[in-house]
Image (cartoon, rainbow, N blue to C red):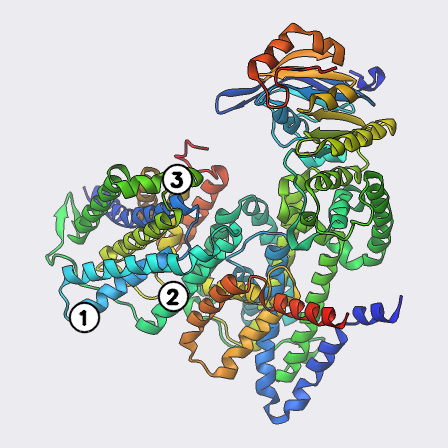
Amino acid sequence: MGEYSHLFQFFFSGITTGSIYALIAVSLVIVYRVSQLICFSQGEFFVFGALFMATLISKGVSLPLAFVISLFGSMAMGGFLQWLLIRRIQGSSIGNLIVMTIAIFLALRGLALIIWGRESYVVRPFTESQPITFMGASLQLQVFWIAGITVFVLLLIWFFFEKTMLGLAMRACAENPLGASLMGISVNRAAFFAWAWGAAIGAIAGMTICPLLFTQYTSGVMPMVKGFIAMSIGGLSSIMGSVIAGLMLGLVESYTIGLISSKFSDAIVFTLLILVLLIRPSGLFNSQR
Amino acid sequence: MNMDKNGIILKIENISKRFEGVHALDGVSFSVKKGQIKALIGPNGAGKTTMLNVISGLVPPDKGNIYFKDNDITGQPPNIIASLGMGRTFQLIRLFTINEATVMDNLLIGASLTLKPGILKSIFLSGRVKRQETKLKDKALEILNFVGLSGKEGVLPSALSFGNQRLVELARALMMDPKMLVLDEPASGLNDMEVENFKGLLLSLKDRGITMLIVEHNMKLVMDIADDIVVLDFGKKLAEGSPKEVCANPEVIAAYLGTKDKNGDGVLCSK
Amino acid sequence: MNIMERLKKAWWILPAVILGIIPLIFKEKSAYVSGILIFAGIYIILAVGLDLLMGYAGQISVGHASFFAIGAYSSAILTVKYGISPLLAMFFGMFLSGLIAWIIGRPVLALKEYYLAMATLAFNEIVITLIIEIEWLTGGASGLKNIPSFSLFGFTMKNNLHYYYFVWFVVFLVVAMTIAIVKSPMGRTLIAIHSDEVAARTFGINSTKYKTGIFVLVNVFASVAGSLYAHYMGFIAPDDFGVSTSVNMLVMLFLGGFGTIYGPAIGALFLKILPELTYFFQDYELLINGVILIIVLVFMPKGMYGIFVAMKRKIGFSRE
């Protein structure tokens, strides 16, 4: 029983980090679908969401309210950046677009450093209670919050893209920008909403993991890179694919930490995934290309 | 097998290529004789460009073999195939434009096989490289003169007309002293006068002994210059022969009538 | 060769003379001024190499600090822990960087655009993680101290002035090599690969070979920069070589002028001198660099060098 309980423990921590990677990956996919752009600054929304919420809570705002304020704040920030910057260099080379999102990354990270300094922040769990024991594995209740919120967000995205006019319009933009603009759908507007949504989802990831993770101004890079890896394994534009890949990535990482080495887990996971990229550059789940 | 003896420079054997389950090429075989102009024609989507890409090594074939000058080049990378003396031009013009590369830069890049650029060479043997480059610049000016672009060597390709950009592509390919040229729709987008000019160039290249394989939609041009024609339809070889034979072939006529090609209008041979 | 051409060939004499006499002008402040210029010089080596890789060969890198780190740590570890001479350690670092670049170059450079950017970034993170975790060798997160001064054939560099002249000698060497490459058929080959790799290959250009070759070269440059940095500072820590450092190099590249070689050198100089002139708090540097990069991308896509060229053209035009 003892050994198995370890494996369960790793499984649950894998699902937890995997959910975060899945959320980041989905936020990247949403932006990519509409504007064919992979945003290197996505991890900064993760940081801003978490740190902004932590600050609000420390100022006495209740947790749910802080969550909502931070969520909408990040959403506004994402939309604003698209409106202010991305729109201006639309149509230039991919290299320039990449560097622009890197510039945004640098600016946001610098801003976070000025606002929050070099300290790490953590908030209290969403529901305070003792960890429960399940099959010999000890579980923080926050794990359920993370899994639940991830499922909720995914359902919301599904509903948005399948059932709402705006969502369908955004899908049309992604599939055929020229056709969409002929139909009177503004590609710019779709990109604006994609960035707002993307930032919001990135922030949700940061806020839900914040009780379990010490977050500081540099915490955005790792989730962004891993979200990207999940996204590219999933085939860049598939939401379902990147969710599955994100969860798998979390599990692989958790078992690597548990069974092989905690020190080198990032190095091992990265090397593994660079290998995956080299073997299947168009993604493991991609059927389009 | 000795291709040289039979005067064959390029031999295509039973080439097949699938893209996502669709047969782009299905068991195509033909050969090109040294010194001739061979045309590859067929309706849109017949697999002509795919054939050229397979020949020049941009796309590996699923099945079959290709021999060029007695070498098996099947599945070889494009740079190796180029080094054997095969030059090509593209349907959509693909000139080098980054960092304000001029027409002369483009031509000199075409001479890469002679220049053999190298990192250490460019640092330690810059004198020798300069001298070699000067010689090649003279050659480039000669070729520009030949295609009718003298005086344009310092211009950015984007400042040239579409027709002239096509000529730069041809000139660039000539810089590699090709034994064989593979031309993908060289006349598309050209006006009548430019087509006539291009025709003259191709014929004088033929006089210089350069073999050509040409994909072209302009049937008048094809009938005027081709020694031999291969017709592709839905990835299969429909017919092969002299322009006259191909014109008279009922299957070919049917294929062209059936598709109402944008240039062909169902009329294959106007003469 | 006429006089104008001769003058053009000797362009480098002017900056060389200016840089040579700067320490003499500043007299008692010369240690401080040369200190700044040493940093600037080290970053010029990095930025010029990155421009050769990105601006010419068209291969994006968001991890150029990786080999800066490998060079610095090779020098530091070999001199501190094994007592090897600094020059030998530097050569070992160059060899190691070249070897690693050659091994990873082929597969990684087969990737394009986003994948390449992300793979180089991930490689940077891997290098930093390894440095932090292999504590017995690298000193871990707290870094390595007491790195001896650089010495050359028995001459030990004791003060800033010595380092200043040495670093800038290396800078001129690196820039001269880079310019030689760029002006030769090799430079045109890189432009061809950058413009249209497929078309380039149909002219017999073995793009994989050239991309890998350039990757090896610029990372050997970066390694040299790392060795100089380690000896000059006497102390290094993983933080000096993180993704932020790599991204700062991108800022220098774009601020100076992408694909112009001299531009990124100007960019590096500017970005290393600016904070000293304005006494910004350290913490503001990230934000300022980010904002500078954004402004450059939106309003001056050709960078400072582009503005300089445009001005020169305008003056030339008015004379005619």
- Chain for numbered disc 1: A
Distance, label 2 to label 1, CA atoms, is: 21 Å
Whether labels 3 and 2 belong to a single chain: the reply is yes
- The residue located at (76%, 16%) in the rendering is B228
Q: Residues within 10 Å of mark 1 (few under 14, many from 20)?
A: few
* Rendered location of residue A184, percent (x, y): 37, 42
Between residues A171 and B68, which one lies in front from this camera angle?
A171
Rendered residue at 66%/27% (across/down): B52
Circle 3 Cα neighbour tier, 10 Å, few/some/many (<14 / 14–19 / ≥20):
some
Callout 3, which amino acid? Ala
Chain to which mark 3 belongs = A
Task: Give the number of the mark in front: 3 or 1.
Answer: 3
Q: Is residue B138 above or below residue C219?
A: above
Which residue position is annotated with label 1? Answer: A58
Q: In which quarter of the image is residue C47?
A: bottom right
From the viewer's side, name the closer residue of B219 and A107.
B219
Residue A147 percent coordinates (x, y): 21, 46
Q: Farthest right residue?
A: C1
Residue A203 vertical position relative to residue A269 in the rendered view, above or below: below
Seen from the viewer's position, the closer of residues C54 and C141 is: C54
Mark whose residue sits in front, 3 or 2: 3
Quadrant of the image occupied by residue A64? bottom left
Work out whether residue A237 can be spotted: no
Where residue C293 appears, x then y in whole percent? 49, 65
Q: Tell which circle, 3 or 2, labels the residue nearer the N-terminal end.
A: 2
**Does residue B77 appear left or right of residue C135 in this picture?**
right
Q: Residue A109 carries which label?
A: 2
Q: Mark 2 — on which chain does it sit?
A: A
**CA neighbours of label 2 inside 10 A, class few (<14), some (14 to 19), many (20+):** many
